[in-house]
Amino acid sequence: MQSDNTTIQPGTDVVLIGAGIMSATLGVMLKELQPDIRIQIFERLDHAAAESSDAWNNAGTGHSAFCELNYTPEDKEGNIDISKAIKIAESFEVSRQFWSFLIEKGLIDHPENFIRSIPHVSFVWGPENVSYLKRRHAALQANPLFSQMEFSEDHDVQKNWMPLVMEGRDAWEQTAATFMKIGTDVNFGELTRAMFHYLKKQDGVSIFFNHEVRRLKQKKNGQWRITVRDRSNGEKYITRTPFVFIGAGGGSLPLLEKAHIPEGDGFGGFPVSGQWLRCTNEAVIEKHFAKVYGKASVGAPPMSVPHIDSRMINGKKELLFGPYAGFSTKFLKNGSYLDLPLSIKANNLIPMLSAGFHNLPLTKYLIDQVRQSDDDRMEALREYVPDAKSEDWVLETAGQRVQVIKKDSEGRGVLEFGTEVVTKADGSLAVLLGASPGASTTASIMIDLLNRCYFDKANTKQWQDKFRQMVPSYGKKLNDNPELLAEIRKKTAKSLQIEN
């Protein structure tokens, strides 16, 4: 016991900070790769998946780029860039393989608790948008990952795909939609809790809820000295480890700053909050069974792409519309209003100011969103559900996201709308920042992280063979191998009990 009442704990091989989908996936992979590894997991809240991974805080699309139009941007010449969509679709197939492995090996069970089939639909209106969607469909369908995508401008076909969206719509309105039958709805909260349920039963794994990491410092011997506070009684503990992963959602940036690694210089964060409209009318809920995504407003962040979304949450069918973006200085839903001001340091002040100046449309968009009235929100909903009635919908608070700000080659700040992994050169620390597509691509992110941080072991035959067991397509591009893609999709669909 130290004089400041700080207890020195036995060391461990790995410390995972944050009990979300990222830490759960990395923890399971590490136990598969090295069964005798010792892992300590620290979560500041009282249960797993309480922040970004929770179903109410996560879009749950199973981001496979089937319907999210922000992954296929159009340039001024009308060219559509599908590279990001292909990358995300590939990554989602990797996640499907990993989840299938978990089911087949018995690490988790009941896939119906966290994944189900649901069509993914993109929906637009107006001549320019219809033209865009038609060209997007042509570009994507030429690739094996998207070969099953259908396109239609016919109202009757669209009524079949999404009756609630087409009900009450003017017959003369020019609309178009794409349809992917093999889309999924993923409850990442349920999946995360299932993996933690498995992990807590494994030898050498300790999970500490209500424990908040306060300090991180790397010693001269390469070990990290981590100070943790038990939020239930105020007691402090110190543990030591050669490897730390920070997967704390919006809380990752402050911890990266506390780690004081050169690779973290210049990183900042811009918090974006969200809200949903949730339908309370069971008859309306039953009319819709699809994830219907539209085009985002100018300046909107990716998490704010509007969608009318059929979900399964806590065993109950739900219908959500949104999200409506907002601004809060909190980095976490259960965070502090001081999160943003305390994150501003000498090394990221200029990048953050520069990013703010170069993203004025986003600032205007967020101001407009914050000022929205109930009538404004219903007006936005009626673009997707023309007959929507105010009394059938209630406003719910969604998750908090922190968009990454990083320095470019000239030292200016760039706002990144994606997921960023920061690793220390010696591989002893990895930090995951950012938001969408996040959870859906976790398996790919963690395999890449393991190759970067455990570079000596990752290239051994033992680890390479295990990677291929967890993800049979490891090292191959499914979009370049149509036969392998078909085989993998058939296999994972059977294991996960979803449409092929």
Image (spheres, rainbow, N blue to C red):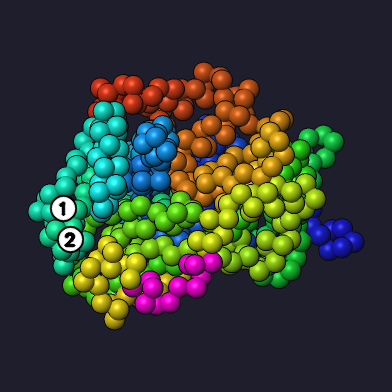
The residue depicted at 58 percent of the width and 62 percent of the height is 332
Q: Identify the residue under disc 2.
A: 166
Classified by dominant secondary structure, the portion drawn in magenta counts as helix
Q: Which of marks 2 and 1 is nearer the N terminus?
A: 1
Which amino acid is tagged 2? Answer: Met
Dot 2 and dot 1 residues touching (CB under 8 Å)? yes
Quadrant containing the C terminus is top left
Quadrant housing residue 251? bottom right
Q: Is residue 375 magenta?
A: yes
Residue 137, position in %: x, y?
Answer: 26, 37
Residue beneath the point at 25% across and 72% down: 388
Disc 1: which residue:
158
Q: How far apart are marks 2 and 1 (CA)?
A: 7 Å
| Vertical side of 334 occupied by 292: above or below | above
Residue at the right extreme of this rendering: 3
Between 356 and 388, which is closer to the camera in this rendering? 356
Task: Report whether 267 appears left or right of 312.
Answer: right
Q: Which residue is drawn at 48% across and 63% down?
A: 325
- Front in this rendered view, residue 243 or 136: 136
Residue extending furthest bottom?
Answer: 391
Q: Where does residue 240 sit, x and y in percent of width and height?
A: 75, 45
In the image, the segment drawn in magenta is 367-378
In the image, residue 381 above or below residue 486: below
| Element under disc 2 | helix
Graded by Cα atoms within 10 Å as few (under 14), some (14 to 19) or many (20 or more), the crowding at tag 2 reads many
Tell me, yes or no, if residue 255 can be seen here: no
Residue 361 position in % (x across, y down): 53, 55
Q: Residue at the location (65% across, 68% down)?
A: 336
| Pick the front one: 379 or 165 | 379
Q: How crowded is mark 1: few (under 14 residues within 10 Å), some or many (20 or more)?
A: many
* Quarter-of-image position of residue 331: bottom right
Q: Which amino acid does label 1 sit on?
A: Gln
